[in-house]
Image: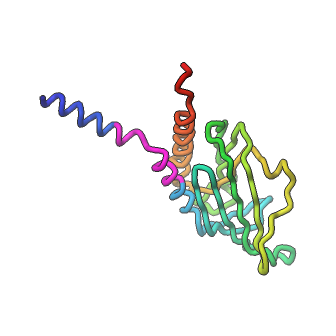
Amino acid sequence: MKKILLILSLSMISLTTFGQTKEETITYLDKVLKMSIGYKIISDTIQECTITSALFRYDKIEIVRKNNDLKPVFKFRSYYTDCYTSINWESLSKIETMGEERMDSLLVYFFVKLDNKVRYDAFAQFETNTSETGMDDDMHYPNYITLFVLKAKAESFKKAIERLVVIAKEENKNPFED
C-alpha cells in the first residue's frame, strides 16, 4: 500500500512539474515580454525608442514603443505599435538573438523565424492622430516576429516558445494518423 501511494504521489508531482499547460506557457511569455517595458531600443532601422507596452497572446503579440529621437523629421511621431497576428506556432523554424550590443545592456532582440507567414500591422501615433504606416503586402505578411526581452530571461523565454510549439503541434495533431 505504501508503494502504491508513493508511486501515485511521484506521478502527480511529475505531471504538475514537467507539463506546463498552454495557458501557463502563454502567461509566462507575456510576463517576460512585459519585463522589457521601460528599456531603450537603439538600432539602424528603428529610431531610439523605449518600450512602453507589451502583450503576448497565443494569436496576437503587440509591442508599443515611444519615440525618443528628437530629430526634426521624427519629432511629431510619438508612439509606434507593432502587432503580429495569425501566428502558426507549429511552423517555427528558428529562434535567435541579436543586436545585444546596440540596446540597453540588459535587453536582447529576439528574431523568431517561421515557415508560414504572419500578419503584421504597424501603427504610428502622431500628436494629433493615429495612422497605419505605409507598407506593401510583403511587409504585412513576413515570416518572422521580432521581440525584445531582458537578457537575463532570454534562455527561459526561448524554451517557453519552444514549449508553445510542442503544445501547438500536440493540439493540432490528427488523432487518426500514426
**Does residue 25 show up magenta in the picture?**
yes
Q: Position of residue 134 (x, y in %)?
A: 86, 61
Image quarter of the C terminus: top right
For the point 67% across and 66% down, the residue is 64
Say which of 18 and 119 sits in front: 119
Q: In terms of image quadrants, where is residue 148? A: bottom right
- Pick the residue in front: 129 or 113: 129
Residue 136: give x, y in percent of width and height: 87, 53
Between residue 77 and residue 136, name the one nearer to us.
136
- What kind of secondary structure does the magenta stretch mostly adopt? helix
User: As displayed, is residue 100 above or below residue 112?
Assistant: below
**Snapshot colouring:** rainbow
Taking depth in this image into account, of 73 and 131 the one nearest to the observer is: 131
Q: Residue at x 65, y 42 (%)?
A: 88
Image coords of residue 94 (percent x, y): 66, 38
- Asked if the magenta segment contains residue 12, the reply would be no
In the figure, is residue 9 to the left or right of 136?
Answer: left
- Name the quadrant of the N terminus: top left
Q: Which residues are magenta?
A: 15-29
22 sits left or right of 94 in the view: left
